[in-house]
Image: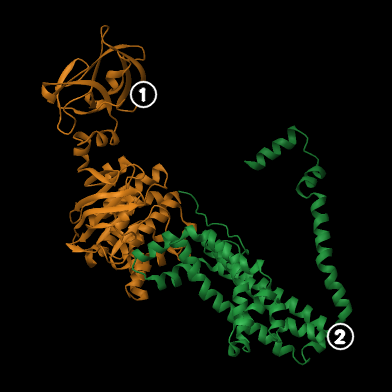
Chain colours: A orange, B green
Amino acid sequence: MATNELAGDKATADTAPAAGLAGQGAREGTSVSLRSLTRAFGATRALDEMSLDIEPGELVALLGPSGCGKTTALRIVAGFEFADSGEVLVDGRDVSGVAANKRDMGMVFQSYSLFPNMSALDNVGFGLRMRGIGTAGRRKQAAELLDMVGLAPQARQFPHQLSGGQQQRVALARALAIQPRVLLLDEPLSALDAKVRLQLREQIRTLQQRLGTTTLFVTHDQEEALSMSDRVGVMRSGKLEQVATPDELYSRPATAFVAEFVGTMNRLPGELTDGGRAVSVIGVTVPVQAGGPDSGAVDALVRPENLTVTPSETGDGIVTVRTFLGAVTRLTVRLSGDTEVVVDVATTAAAEMTPGTAVQVGLPQSPVLVAARES
Amino acid sequence: MASVTRDLGIAMTPAPPPVRRQKRSHPVWRWVILLVAGVYFLLPLYAALRFAGISAFGGVFTTPGFGSSLWLSVKLAAVTWVITMLLMIPTTVYIHLRLPQLRRLLEGITILPIVIPPVVLIIGVLQVMPLALRSSVWLLAIEYVVLAMPFAYRALDAGLRAIDVKTLTEASGSLGAGWITTLWRVILPNLSTGLLSATILIVALVLGEFTMASLDLQQTFPVWIVLFDQTNAQISVAASIFALVVTWLVLMLITVLSSRRSRRSGGAEVTLFSVAPRETIGN
């Protein structure tokens, strides 16, 4: 079983079957647009005027905490839910009133969704059967797809005989078998253990890029979203806070929520100066990045790697915790005023900064995002 | 590893007394209960067998009314099964998919035929039915559908709870299948355990129902047994035992075959009201 899990990447690299699929008609990418989607469940607005444009062949992840509306958005695109208002355009055509089975979209679900009464081969061939493809052609294509995800030897096995990772790979092959206009992934990796998750996410991304299938991917795991996607949309309370490339999202978050949801972020008490264009924080005045309040009590939001730390007998901080993370070491430093910050430093430089060491924390002169101070 | 540990255990410490171990895994009271239950169920059968005598079994098949009444009961069981399934499968699936909040209400409604005595049901129905239908034997099948509803609903409900019917339906839909195809190719095959449980219960119910058939003046197999009992009690009792054995064999056959088939695709054992969920083999 483990052999097959590990075989996945190798099989993905072996392009012959996939080339067959692509050659047979993996489609030109399809554009998808969500226009002002609103959906309420009772008094709760799961989606609030949400809009998103996905370019052909692009993989966009919707990232957000539980209940932010990301799955509702995906289900509306799939046709399993209907928006109270707004529309879903696929290649410019409104599909809002089209039933799920007519939308030509492949979906991989969070829970194992293979049909228990069918073998892996028949599961993959199911969508082809619905399209009227004969037994021989269906089996040939299904076998190719199983080979593509590294599960050719498991073709005759039933879902209960497959591991969770294998089941999700069969589900992926099944969704791709119909050469969907859009591939929808609803947290397909969340039920898997860390090792299998890592392998499968690389496999999904490789296949998606090779086939050029426009993909909408829902996840609450930021690492997954950032590592797999062309762009990531961070959602909160039914709205998209920011849609950006992973590096832009990380380095230039548009809002405090995005800044704190994606990666680790320090909140340092600051004081706005120069009419809100600069902020004074830990004794340094730095420019303020657009997107935050321009008056009132604020915190400066700074990533651990954007702070500097040097041993100093006269410094205003004390190292309290030192955590080895490999190439970098994370130091937790208590500043005067009982503020705690975490700072990432090169492991080679962190050797002398053991807990109890007096240090000076510094901030480079680059713009920082500010947010209203939390009480 | 286990055998090494066991060997070491034997060499270094005295093994626990085997009698004590046996007592723990097979306590006496279990055998007592089994014996009492066995006597309770088998003694009447033995008494009936002694009363009828072996020779009576030879005459059962040639007795007037035996074949026709048995055939009528079988036909009624088949029609009842068809109507019940046509009504209950879509209803139960729909409730699971779209109206799960109504499951409790439906459970309450389906319990009514058990609470209301059959005699009340049949007399009420006979009062309001048009004459043409009142004289039809198929009215009984419709009545049996009502009686079978609680059992069928619970068996199907247990089957549906054992599978993720919502995800399977959506997966099927996303692959292009319509509602009928999804029901036929995805839900029903995975509901086979629940369907067979419902079938067993319906067949057993119809083959054994007396009150309604008697009041509706239909000579089903149980009614024939009671009526014939007044002229030849030995033959009547022999027919009862014969019917019991045949029914039991048929139900056992269904159970064994369906369990074997279910195991092949990773399903659960066939039981009447509970179905164990399927399990995967880990990540």
Q: Position of residue A339 (x, y in %)?
A: 31, 18
Name the one closer to the observer, A15 or B252: B252
| Camera-side residue of B135 and B202 | B135
Q: Position of residue A101 (x, y in %)?
A: 32, 67
Mark 1–mark 2 CB contact (< 8 Å):
no
Rendered-image quadrant of the N terminus of chain B: top right
Q: Chain of mark 1?
A: A
Instruction: Report in which chain the residue with disc 2 lies.
Output: B
Q: Taking A101 as reference, is A258 above or below it?
A: above
* Camera sees residue B176: yes
| Label 1 and label 2 in one chain | no
> Which residue extends farthest top?
A313
For the residues labelled 1 and 2, the Cα–Cα distance comes to: 90 Å
Residue at the front extreme, as displayed? B127
Can you see residue B267? no
Residue ID for mark 1: A323
Q: Secondary structure at mark 2?
A: helix
Q: Amino acid at mark 2?
A: Ser
Dot 1 falls on a residue whose secondary structure is strand
Q: Is residue A179 left or right of residue A169?
A: left
Answer left or right for A333 relative to B21.
Answer: left
Query: Which residue carries the number 2 mark?
Result: B55
* Mark 1 burial class by Cα count in 10 Å: few <14, some 14-19, many 20+: few
When asked about the image quadrant of residue B176, the answer is bottom left
- Which amino acid, by three-letter code, is at mark 1? Thr
Q: Quadrant location of residue B149?
A: bottom right
**Could you say which disc has been placed on residue B42 in the image?**
none
Circle 2 Cα neighbour tier, 10 Å, few/some/many (<14 / 14–19 / ≥20) = few
Q: Nearer the viewer, residue A280 or B213?
A: B213
* Lateral position of residue B71 relative to residue A372, left or right: right
**B70 horizontally vs B183: left or right:** right
Q: What percent of the width, then of the height, locates residue B212? A: 69, 79
